[in-house]
Image: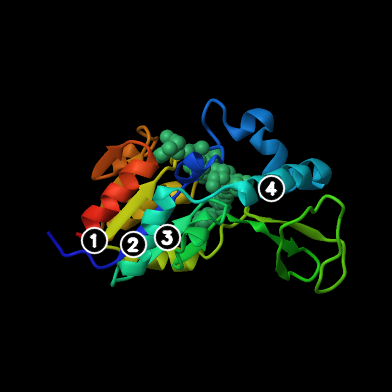
């Protein structure tokens, strides 16, 4: 077997579930309170900006109240100690990877604690409400929206992600259902370039059959165990 040097890790809502942040497609999922098309599309924002801003105000509050769990901490340890290339591509908008200490993190679907000015395109760290249409600190326009990638919008830094996938020796997917593209296709991208592929999830996902190996269990247990194994 080829020695592993470059690792790409994809994380989804499942890694933050044990930190108290709800996943999207579980029975008690987020979208039972709010249908995804009511809040996570640019069309919904144009139709009912108040609903969307209220929804993301609440998400922001939840993120601020949450704490990293042992799975985030284990990946932060891997980031500190892994001598080769490593990239944690997260679909999550929380900052729990960073608060656990990870640095090589890319938020492909945006960040809850960021606001994007649609007038001047500045981005600002944001921890309070956007519901009252505050002025953009850079240009003064009342044009701030959540810095989130909605359905139909291009995820962030796709070139950097595809380039890391092409160099990866190991691709690991943690706590994601494989329901949303382009992230759901990363396993095939990585495999087509020769990477070994591993899924860590609570239960089998839509994409499980595409992985070389699937390990089932709560992220707080199976991620630290896997990191221990990789760091030897
Ligand atoms: C645990 C656990 C525990 C629980 N331990 N595990 C037809 C075919 C292909 C594509 C399309 C198509 N029709 C439309 C599209 C495109 C569309 C898409 O994919 N739609 C699908 C619904 C079909 N995608 C887009 O529009 C994207 N943009 C795009 O494609 O641009 C064009 C492009 C082309 C080519 C290249 C590049 C780009 C944008 C997608 C934006 C997604 N946005 C959201 C909301 C915003 C963020 C937010 O508000 O938080 O992102 S949707 C939502 O789903 C969120 C998530 O990041 C994303 C993924 O969800 P995730 O993380 O997988 O969560 P769940 O709940 O689904 O799964 C949780 C998992 O955890 C489960 O498996 C559990 O088992 C597990 N679990 N507890 C371990 N304790």
**Residue 78 disc label:** 2
State the separation of the CA atoms marked 4 and 1. 35 Å
Left or right of residue 136: residue 188? left
Q: Is residue 152 visible?
A: no
Tag 3 and tag 2, C-beta contact below 8 Å: no
Give me the C-alpha separation between circle 3 and circle 1: 16 Å
Question: CA gap, disc 3 to disc 2?
Answer: 10 Å
Residue found at x 33% / y 42%: 221
Near mark 1 (Cα within 10 A), the count class, few <14, some 14-19 or many ≥20, is few
Residue 75's x, y, as percent?
Answer: 38, 57
Q: Nearer the viewer, residue 206 or 18?
A: 18
Quarter of the picture containing the C terminus is bottom left
Residues marked 4 and 1 touching at CB (< 8 Å): no
Q: Which mark is residue 25?
A: none
Going from N to C along the chain, the mark reached first, 4 or 3, is 4
Residue 88 marker: 3
The numbered dot on residue 61 is: 4
> Could you tell which of marks 1 and 2 lies nearer the N-terminus?
2
Q: Quadrant of the N terminus?
A: bottom left
Residue 26's spot in the image, x, y percent?
A: 51, 30
Q: CA distance from mark 4 to mark 3?
A: 24 Å
Q: Quadrant of residue 35?
A: top right
Which of labels 4 and 3 is toward the front?
Answer: 4
Q: Residue at x 57, y 31 (%)?
A: 29
Residue, disc 1: 231
């Amino acid at each position: 077997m080829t020695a592993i040097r470059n690792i790409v890790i994809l994380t989804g809502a499942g890694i933050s579930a044990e930190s108290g942040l709800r996943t999207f497609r579980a029975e008690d999922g987020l979208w039972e309170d709010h249908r995804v098309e009511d809040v996570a599309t640019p069309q919904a924002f144009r139709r009912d900006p108040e609903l969307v801003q209220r929804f993301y105000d609440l998400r922001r509050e939840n993120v601020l109240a949450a704490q990293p769990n042992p799975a985030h901490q284990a990946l932060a340890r891997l980031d500190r100690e892994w001598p080769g290339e490593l990239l944690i591509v997260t679909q999550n908008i929380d900052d729990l990877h960073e608060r656990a200490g990870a640095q090589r993190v890319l938020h492909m679907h945006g960040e809850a604690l960021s606001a994007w000015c649609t007038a001047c395109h500045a981005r600002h760290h944001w921890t309070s409400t956007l519901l009252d249409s505050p002025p953009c600190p850079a240009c003064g326009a009342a044009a701030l929206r959540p810095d989130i990638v909605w359905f139909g919008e291009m995820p962030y830094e796709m070139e950097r992600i595809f380039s890391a996938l092409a160099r990866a020796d190991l691709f690991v997917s943690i706590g994601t259902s494989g329901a949303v593209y382009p992230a759901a296709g990363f396993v095939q991208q990585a495999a087509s370039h020769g990477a070994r592929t591993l899924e860590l999830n609570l239960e089998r996902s839509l994409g499980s059959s595409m992985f070389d190996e699937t390990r089932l269990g709560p992220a707080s247990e199976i991620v630290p165990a896997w990191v221990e194994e990789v760091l030897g």
